[in-house]
Image: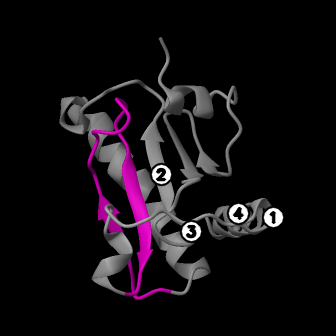
Amino acid sequence: MATIFSRIASGEIPSFKVAENEKFFAFLDISPLSFGHTLVIPKQEVDYIFDMDESLHMEFWDFAMKIAKALKQVVPCVKIGVAVIGLEVPHAHIHLVPMNSMEDINFSRPKLKFPDDEMLKVAKAISEKL
């Protein structure tokens, strides 16, 4: 059975898409830690990031780096935090979180919610910076 992330990448479940190529997909987290929180996934279903083929793994990080640089140009922040946790969805993914303090990447705090029009606007702005 396809993971929720595979269903998002295929378009079966709608998302606020930031970027896509033949191997990877980036979209805004709908329960973000901060405005602009983006998830980057491989289209290939791999549960554990370190089980990825080495070449795909390196391409994955290159793709994520491009997204992070574009994200930082769009969302005012000190840095883009990176987290790989992998327990909540059995599909490798990288969290890119705009940060102004360490608290901005604290996964135990309550998640945020932003209006769809704001999410669409920031997703489009990030995409345009790529």
Q: Earlier in the sequence, mark 4 or mark 3?
A: 3
- Camera-nearest label, 2 or 1: 1
Residue that extends furthest to the front in the rendered view of this protein = 110
Q: Are marks 4 and 3 in contact (CB under 8 Å)?
A: no
Say what secondary structure mark 3 lies in: loop
Mark 4 burial class by Cα count in 10 Å: few <14, some 14-19, many 20+: many
Residue on which disc 1 sits: 117
Residue on which disc 2 sits: 39
The colour style of the image is one colour
Residue on which disc 4 sits: 119
- Magenta range: 77-100
- Which amino acid is tagged 2? Leu
- In the rendered view, tell whether residue 16 sits above or below residue 91: below
Task: Find residue 36 and name its label.
Answer: 3
Q: Residue at x 40, y 87 (%)?
A: 100
Judge whether residue 92 is colored magenta: yes
Say what secondary structure mark 2 lies in: strand
Judging depth in this view, the residue of 1 and 61 nearest the camera is: 1
User: How far apart in space, not on screen, are marks 2 and 3 (Cα)?
Assistant: 10 Å
